[in-house]
Amino acid sequence: MNIFALSGFINGIAALIFGGFVYLKNRKKLENKLFVLLNLAIAIWAINYGFWQMAIDKTIALFFIRLLMVGAIFIPVSLLHFILKFLGLDQKKKRILILNYLIALFLFIFNFTPLIVRNVRSILYFPFWPEGGILFHFFIFWFFTTIIYVIYLLIGSFYKSKGYKREQIKYLILASVIGLGGGVTNYPLWYGVLLPPYGNFLVFLYPFILFYAITHYRLMNIRVVVGRAAIYLFSFLSVIGISFSLIFLNNRLVHPISFNVLGPLIIIIAVLLFQFFFRFFEKLASRYFYYTFYSYQKVLTDLGEKLTQILDLKKLGSLIVDTLIKTMQLDRSVVLTREESGHYAILRNIGFKEENGISLVKDNFLTKYLEKTKKPLVYEELSLIQRDSVFKEEKKSLSKLQENMKRIEANLCLPLFREDKIIGIIVLGKKISGDPYSQEDLELLTALSAQASVALNNAQLYAKVQDLSQNLQEKIGQQTKELKEAYQKVNKAYQIEKKAHQELKKLDEAKDQFIMATQHHMRTPLTIMKGYVSMLLEGDYGKINKEARKRLVFLQQSIEKLITLVNEFLDISQFRVGKGVLNLKEVKIEDLIREIIKELKWEAEDKGLYIKMKKLKISPVVKADRSKLKEAIYNIIDNGIKYTKKGGITISLKIENYKLKIAIHDTGIGMTKEEIKTLFSETFERGKEAKKVYALGRGIGLYIASNIIKAHRGKIWAESPGEGKGSTFYIELPVK
Ligand code: ADP
């Protein structure tokens, strides 16, 4: 086998494996199918190339060359179709595509005639090199035109596209130029140009370049299945090895089993063994190469469903991180949650250093960026995004983010949303196997993040409600405690107050007792003085001159006043200490008042005032201490006369609700509201106007009157429309 044959086989096997695994992984997409078709064409061309190089005679060589041409004819058209589909131009360029298919079909029909490959001849160091027929020129022309057109389309789209697509196109151009360009070096010899087809050795680079694009830039939307392919291959080789060993051993037997029997037997054994080997290599791979055959779909869909049933935040975080790490074989992952304040917290972290886990969200950029794009952010994409960004600031922030992700070895950020706001981010490290995240990974993770968002939302709300009730309980507890404390304080204060009050009362009582005693001792000498003065005046001790009599009368008046004062004080004190015992008898009020009027008549007439009483039809009777009640009413009527300059006093009686109401109205100086307030109090205050009108007043009379009325379980109060507008005093007493 010469090296050209070898290169043919290598190219063919590379194309077969490559096309095979794209087919295995995702055969549903038309794009992938077309890619498989292209690889098949290349494989047909390359493998037959190998066989042709190994051909020992002219006919065999010609046969393989013609077979090779089948592949060659379908390379440009399948490439064109694939690229048009890839660039999304397949509908727009439908006519061109159909034309190309027709050309391919046309060439295929004539392929096994000398119109395309006429014959073979010896040239350079090739014993059988083909000579082209008439249609071969057409083929070559068409081949180049199509390839150039495809490259032209790719370059055109390259400038128009962004990000990943742009990178993918770049590699497609590279692969087409190197791979197909290498293949093209086969053609000069056809025209007798002595240029050896060394480019052929480059053809196998084409799947490698595309493989790189697939793994790094998610070309073809397939996940890397090298592991799986390897496991298939090893299983396959093991089975073949065992089958051959069996055949070999059989041949060594004295009586070998006929191949007709052994053949099917071996096939059955091989089928059974394949399962065994496959599982064996699978285990081996997962143990030593962290290769997983997890069904993304299943595990992640299950996880999504489980998540929405969890309300506990911590459990939720653990389930997400643990499952992702286990199923995807990741080196690290962290779930960050974000509060309304914008503050992030680590919910669950495996593999990241504590401070690193949160460092991505230290500035607001990542949050804002994810809120804008609303899709997972992949580390490898960052440089492309950066390149395409038109804003200087954004470029800078992106570069910073990229550095940061690299430093902490974060590869993927999955945003979690509540409406349009980020409520969390799942950050993933890299796969232990070293594989990049495939498009399928991203699609599944995006679906997962939607479910995780719902779950996180629920859990956060639940936590909030729980927090609230906890808080509420704490608050109620606290307030109850505070209330208790306050109550205790109030109680303590009350006790102190009570004690103070009791002490004050005692003191007051002692004071009253003292006053009573003093008054008693004052009254006796005063009465003696009064007696001697009247005896002196009456001439019991001889005649007194006129001047001395005048002084003695004055002395007598002063003593009288003093006695009244002392008596008044005594009354107050007696009532206060409860000693003012009432001598209750039936009293006809009308008579009592008439008596008072009679006594005061002269005083009133002296001032030119009238004094009258409105009579009632019936004569009311009250149970009262006659002399005390008289004193009280007397005082009030007397006040009326004292504080009235013009007009007079009107007394009226009324019975209402079993109560007798005595109203004593005057047309005097009146009172202010302030004066009324302190009228019956112990402060013994006097009105300003009153002092002018009657300088001798002491402000005690009303206090005594009020005490007497209260002792009779009655009420006393005063009303006045204001200064100079007269006053009315009311006394209310219960009637029998
Ligand atoms: P006194 O009349 O000796 O001053 P009272 O206790 O009888 O003491 O009266 C207290 C005060 O009430 C009086 O000084 C006066 O200011 C006011 N007062 C009482 N009766 C009247 C009234 N009929 N008209 C106006 N003011 C009055």
Image: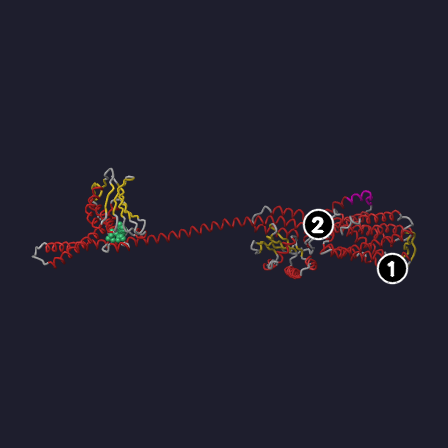
Disc 2 marks which residue?
A: 280
**What is the magenta segment's predominant secondary structure?**
helix
Write the start and end of the magenta stretch as one range: 255-267
Name the kind of residue labelled 2 in the image: Phe
- Displayed quadrant of residue 379: bottom right
In this rendered view, identify the residue nearer to me: 58 or 406: 406
Relative to 419, 506 lies left or right: left
Can residue 361 be seen by looking at this rendering? Answer: yes
Q: In which quarter of the image is residue 514?
A: bottom left
Q: What is the distance, in whole Å, between disc 2 and disc 1 at their CAs? A: 47 Å
Mark 2 packing: few (<14 Cα in 10 Å), some, or many (20+)? few
Mark found first going from the N terminus, 2 or 1: 1
In the rendered structure, the answer to whether residue 289 lies left or right of residue 131 reads left
In the image shown, does 401 or 236 lie closer to the viewer? 401
Label annotation for residue 196:
1
**Which residue reaches farthest left?**
542
Is 95 contained in the magenta span? no
> Residue furthest toward the top?
618
Amino acid type of the residue tagged 1 in the rendering: Pro
Query: Quick check: can you spot residue 521?
Result: no
